[in-house]
């Protein structure tokens, strides 16, 4: 929020809301001792969507050229790459994920791991001559799009 120049009074309000929180588990005849909550907002909090927008803004803004676009909503994001060939587009998307301070780094730094089994790569070739590059069947950091 500071990076987005949100006034400090709002930052302090959110900080107060999210600091020193505890919960108890209660089921059957059992009630736990208080358990500290060190991340996230209260379930059902109407601010959670707004706060997540601040949280993942660096990921959405990781595109760096006019042929790259991104969009996100809560924990879903998408990149759109335009290029002269599918191979070039695959290389661009790979760079968006693997270069320092981009996709995979953001994911690790923000405790928000990608579920690569949910990754979808859609190709829209310019012509029937543009053949999709081979992709790995086992997702991984270095095998995302070859």
Image (cartoon, rainbow, N blue to C red):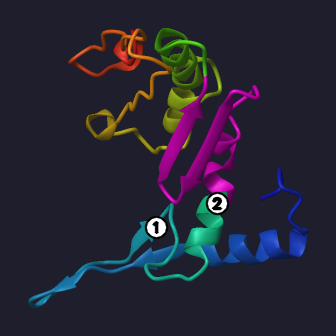
Q: Where residue 94 sits in the image (x, y, percent)?
A: 50, 18
Left or right position of 137 against 2: left
Q: Nearer the viewer, residue 117 or 92?
A: 92
**Label 2: element kind:** helix
Q: What residue is drawn where x is 38% and y is 18%?
A: 144
Q: Which mark is residue 53?
A: 2
Task: Decide whether residue 71 is among the magenta residues.
Answer: yes
Disc number placed over residue 37 in the picture, else none:
1
**For the residues bearing labels 2 and 1, Cβ distance under 8 angstroms:** no
Magenta stretch in the rendered image = 54-82
User: Of tags 2 and 1, which is closer to the observer?
Assistant: 2
Circle 1: element type:
strand
50 lies above or below 32: above
Along the viewing direction, whichever of 69 and 125 lies nearer the viewer: 125
Taking 98 as reference, is 103 above or below it?
Answer: below
The residue under the point 52% across, 75% down is 21
Residue 99 position within the rendered picture, expressed as x and y whole percent measured from the top left: 60, 17
Total residue callouts: 2
Quadrant into which the N terminus falls: bottom right
Q: Assess disc 1: are there few (<14), some (14-19) or many (≥20) residues with their C-alpha within 10 Å of its C-alpha.
A: some
> Residue at the spot x=55%, y=11% of the render?
88
- Residue 139, image quadrant: top left
Q: Can you tell which quarter of the image residue 120 is in?
A: top left
Residue 98 vs 29, above or below: the answer is above
Residue 106 in view, yes or no? no
The answer to whether residue 122 is seen in the rendering is: yes
Residue at the image position 22 percent from the left and 19 percent from the top:
138
Mark 2 surroundings: few (<14), some (14-19) or many (≥20) residues within 10 A: some
Sooner in the amino-acid sequence: mark 2 or mark 1: 1
Q: Residue 84 location, x and y as percent?
A: 60, 13
- Spot the residue most to the front: 128
């Amino acid at each position: 929020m500071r990076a987005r120049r949100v006034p400090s009074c709002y930052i302090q309000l959110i900080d107060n809301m999210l600091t020193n929180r505890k919960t108890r588990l209660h089921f059957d005849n059992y009630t736990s001792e208080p358990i500290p909550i060190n991340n996230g907002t209260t379930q059902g909090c109407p601010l959670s969507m707004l706060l997540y927008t601040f949280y993942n803004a660096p990921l959405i803004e990781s595109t760096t050229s006019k042929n790259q676009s991104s969009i996100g909503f809560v924990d879903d994001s998408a990149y759109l790459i335009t290029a002269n060939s599918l191979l070039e587009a695959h290389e661009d998307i790979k760079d968006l994920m693997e270069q320092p301070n981009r996709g995979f780094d953001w994911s690790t730094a923000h405790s928000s791991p990608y579920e690569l089994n949910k990754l979808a790569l859609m190709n829209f070739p310019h012509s029937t001559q543009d053949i999709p590059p081979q992709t790995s069947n086992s997702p991984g950091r270095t095998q995302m799009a070859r």
